[in-house]
Amino acid sequence: MPELPEVETVRAGLAQHLVGAKVTGLEVLDARSLKKNLGGVQGFKTEVLGAQLESVVRRGKFLWLPTSTSRALVGHLGMSGQILVRTPDHAPDPQTRVVIDVETTSGQDLQIRFVDQRLFGGLMFDDLVLTKDLGPGGFSPEAPTGAYIPTTVSHIARDLLDPLFDDIQVAIKMTKKNSGIKRVLLDQGLLSGIGNIYADESLWLAKLHYDKPASSITKKKHLELLSIAKEVLAKAVEQGGTSFDEQYKNVNGESGYFSQSLNAYGQTGLPCNRCGALIKRDAWANRGSHYCPKCQRR
């Protein structure tokens, strides 16, 4: 599933084209991609046609576009979702579910194509509400939108790349958790944006076993882990995220290349880049955890 770096790559790509753009048309090729929109297909069409897209905002793995209607167009990539920006004459993209026609501020006609192979992602309109801490709803440097966030995202904590993320308070909360440290890193109500890939990478760098109880780790070590995870996420954003197959693409349809920098995730059976022991993969929470059995002892 796309994590913060992949979603941020998409957000930045969309912002280059869509800030201030006006929606001029809509084609719904598969209504299942609008299944979470309370107004259904017709309600979606009514809201999106003629709307102006004021900005492109991200918190953690969530992405939304506030509109001139004081609501937000929320997009979630799910397991295999892609949001591509194409010219109208571009060749069709397989598994395209929704096409939104827009006119940019420069007068260029473009299409937003929502592509989703597995149909776990989708688009919807949602109300905007004030954030709990009255800080900006999410990351949107091109066109800041104030302290508003979609209701469906309001329960998601700030992420490590958010200027308002409070490392000390989060570290204190982590010391009170009895769950394994990887489960804590994946708790989107505590800190958002980290998934399986970047949790494994951060834990490898911190020399922590994924199942070590968070309560047995010192506050100082938690702060070190958060700092490492922040660096991992930032580096992955610089490299366009991680692509292992055709499912994750940026808005131009290109793959990210952070996979070339991975030390743990997907490296099963290869020598650890630190000590030479073979990287292991344990079945964990219906997925897997990758770690070095020598460097990351429980």
Image (spheres, rainbow, N blue to C red):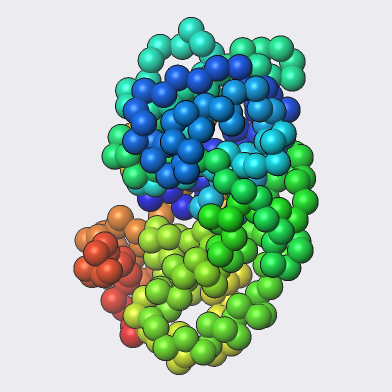
Rendered view: 72 above or below 183: above
Check the picture and name the quadrant holding the C terminus. bottom left
Tell me where residue 187 appears, x and y as whole percent.
46, 70
Q: Residue at x 66, y 50 (%)?
A: 128
Residue 24, by quadrant, is top right
Asked whether, in this view, residue 106 is left or right of residue 269, the answer is right
Tell me where residue 106 appears, x and y as whole percent.
74, 15
Rendered view: 91 above or below 126: above
Q: Residue at x 66, y 12 (%)?
A: 108
Tell me where residue 217 appears, x and y as whole percent.
49, 88
Residue 141, by quadrant, is top right
Q: Residue at x 69, y 36 (%)?
A: 69
Tell me where residue 143 appears, x and y as whole percent.
76, 40
Asked whether, in this view, residue 260 is left or right of residue 135, the answer is left
Rendered view: 238 above or below 189: above
Instruction: In this rendered view, identify the residue nearer to me: 90 or 238.
Output: 90
Asked whether, in this view, residue 43 is left or right of residue 210, the answer is right
Asked whether, in this view, residue 185 is left or right of residue 227, the answer is left
Would residue 178 be seen by someone viewing this image from the given angle? yes
Q: Residue at x 65, y 22 (%)?
A: 50
Instruction: In this rendered view, identify the residue nearer to me: 33 or 182.
Output: 33
Would residue 4 be seen by someone viewing this image from the given angle? no
So how many labels did they put on this image? 0
